[in-house]
Amino acid sequence: MYKFTGWMLPTGTLFDRYAVRDWSGAQVQTSKYFLGLAAGTMGHVVGVLEVAPNQLLLVVEWDSTDATARRMDCFSQSETEQYLVRVLAPTRSGLR
């Protein structure tokens, strides 16, 4: 977890420790265009940013083929609900 000691702009409803657990390590994709990222862009939740006690933001690192173009964004709970979809791992039905 990262500790944020600066200031922040209002971002909507923030995550609490219980709600953010469901997103830890999740693979995500954008559900619609978001600040230069096309709908369907894939990424991973790499951590959380604590902006105040029990008020957290998700930190998402976006997948890129260009190692020098690493991009990370922070999402409040309300932004997560508006812009992100959790990608479920494919099931291996029929395999033993």
Image (tube, rainbow, N blue to C red):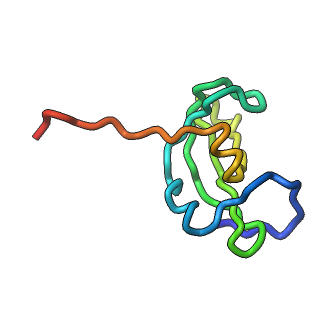
54 or 59, which lies in front? 54
Image position of 19 (left or right of 7) = left
How far from the left and from the top, in percent, is residue 83?
66, 37
Residue drawn at point x = 67 percent, y = 24 percent:
38
Residue drawn at point x = 56 percent, y = 33 percent:
42
Residue drawn at point x = 63 percent, y = 47 percent:
60
Q: Quadrant of residue 49?
A: bottom right
How many marks on residues? 0
Residue extending furthest toward the bottom:
53
29 or 31, which lies in front? 31
Residue 8 vertical placement versus 70 (above, below)? below
77 or 90, which lies in front? 77
* Image quarter in which the N terminus is found: bottom right
How far from the left and from the top, in percent, is residue 70?
68, 40
Residue extending furthest toward the left:
96
Residue extending furthest toward the top:
38
Image position of 72 (left or right of 65) = right
Q: Quadrant of residue 48?
A: bottom right
Residue 39 vertical placement versus 71 (above, below)? above
Image position of 36 (left or right of 17) = right
Residue drawn at point x = 57 percent, y = 60 percent:
20
* Image quarter in which the C terminus is found: top left
Q: Quadrant of residue 32?
A: top right
